[in-house]
Image (cartoon, rainbow, N blue to C red):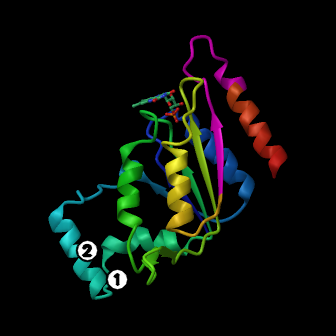
Amino acid sequence: MVLYVNACVRQESRTKRLADFFLAGLCEPTEEVRLDTIPFPVADAKFLERRDRLVSEAKFDDPMFDLAKQFSGADEIVIAAPLWDLSFPASLKQYFEQINVPGVTFVYSSDGAPKSLCRAKKLTYITTVGGNDFPESFGFGYIQALAQSFYGIHDVRLIYAAGLDIAGADVESILTKVENAMRTRR
Ligand SMILES: Cc1cc2nc3c(=O)[nH]c(=O)nc-3n(C[C@H](O)[C@H](O)[C@H](O)COP(=O)(O)O)c2cc1C
């Protein structure tokens, strides 16, 4: 199962268009998590206390762990998120706060390093950018570090289209070029 984490927001999202194109090429069963439909709980002290207690009692059947279990059981991960304020929408950070659960997606080994409990070996991050400058380190770089260090996903790929909001940009041709590149990479 391919897990599609959809952090796109706008009805006419160009990021979603690229993600849909990519997923159509995979021809594999996909489960989509639409982050804009999830009422994420605030990760406040009460929330963390409850979660710590459930984790220490290994009560992973609580619904608060559903997203984490879905992520750790997926064969492949696809994340679609537009570039917002040099990174991505806050809903994606909220998602990671929910799935980063010791005992479900990772455990700390005796030397303190996280050890993955996830099945996936590949993650594709798809984004689009308004300007021409795409600062990889804040959005994609963060996801890559998280995937590699916590989830044991070392094959982390990036697909992006930039310059979409520049006056006079030929948006259709920029997106088509990225789609054609995806086609030839298959
Ligand atoms: C809240 C917000 C923040 C944005 N921040 C940036 C930014 O930091 N740099 C940039 O080049 N474009 C930025 N943009 C433009 C988007 O990256 C661009 O329009 C992108 O294609 C939107 O993706 P979508 O069509 O999937 O919604 C921002 C747009 C929004 C709505």
Instruction: Please indicate whether residue 9 sits to the left or right of residue 162 in the image.
Output: left
Q: Which residue is mark 2?
A: 51
What stretch of residues is rendered in magenta?
Answer: 156-173
Residue lying farthest to the front in this orientation: 111
Residue at figure coordinates x 66%, y 43% from the top left: 159
Q: Is residue 4 above or below residue 86?
A: below
Secondary structure beneath dot 2 equals helix
User: Which image quarter: residue 162?
Assistant: top right
**x and y percentages locating residue 173 in the rendered image:** 72, 24
Q: Which mark is residue 61?
A: 1
Which residue is more in the foreground, 181 or 138? 138
Residue at figure coordinates x 28%, y 85% from the top left: 56
Per the image, is 159 magenta?
A: yes
Q: Is residue 139 above or below residue 161?
A: below
**x and y percentages locating residue 100 in the rendered image:** 40, 67
Q: Which mark is residue 1?
A: none
Label 1 CB-ligand 1 distance < 8 A: no
Secondary structure beneath dot 1 equals loop
Q: Earlier in the sequence, mark 1 or mark 2?
A: 2
Q: Quadrant of the N terminus?
A: bottom right
* Residues at circles 1 and 2 in contact by the CB criterion of under 8 Å: no
**x and y percentages locating residue 75 in the rendered image:** 62, 70
Which residue is more in the foreground, 11 or 122? 122
Residue at figure coordinates x 75%, y 31% from the top left: 177
**x and y percentages locating residue 32 in the rendered image:** 52, 58
Q: Which amino acid, mark 2?
A: Arg
